[in-house]
Amino acid sequence: MSVTGRLIESIAPEGGMKSQLRTLTGLISVIAVISPFIGDGFRLDIESFSIDSEIESESLELSEQVDDTILSLAAETFEEYFEDKLNKNGIKARIRAEAAFDENGEIVLEKLTVFSDSKSEQDVIERLLGEDTEGGGIGIVFSQEVESQ
């Protein structure tokens, strides 16, 4: 390309035409250099990269981890709240809560498991817990095996 440019420059007449010829030769050189990148010779197909599926997979995994963490913290909060409520009423019991997301993406209490040695307090416990869970379709399960912390 350089040789061709020099040859054209050497046979071109002197004067104003020579500067225009240089400009034209330079333009042709630039086009020759970039044409493989913009023509049919070079294609960049973004869809051929698998990075999208990797990012989507990692994003989904991270989203699931965040959801699990949020539900775990919500369950702990429910447990603390109901244990405090029972303790204020003189009932010693451990609570295990299960939380989930509803169809609107809100956190809801799904199930409470009460670990208590006293079967006689079951009605009182149901009444106290039922004050805050009424109408929610929440299962309250009693277990006489006290869960270890």
Image: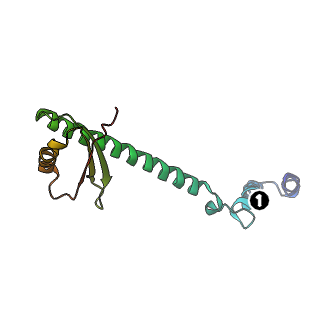
- Which of 127 and 121 lies nearest the eye of the viewer? 121
User: 6 left or right of 22?
Assistant: right
Q: Is residue 106 above or below residue 83?
A: below
Coloring basis for residues: rainbow
Q: Is residue 35 above or below residue 73?
A: below
Q: Residue at coordinates 61% horizontally, 63% vertically from top-left?
A: 47
Nearer-the-camera pick, 137 or 93? 93
Residue 46 relative to residue 122: left or right: right
> Where does residue 125 sit, x and y in percent of width and height?
15, 44
Disc 1 crowd, CA 10 A, few/some/many (<14, 14-19, 20+): few
Q: Residue at x 66, y 60 (%)?
A: 44
Relative placement, left or right, of 85 versus 138 is: left
Q: Name the residue tied to disc 1.
A: 32
Percent x, y for residue 34?
72, 57
**On screen, 81 above or below 137?**
above
Residue 87 image position (x, y, % from top left): 16, 33
Residue 79 appears at what percent x and percent y?
A: 25, 40
Residue 88 vs residue 45, the one in the foreground: 88
Image quadrant in which you'd find residue 25:
bottom right
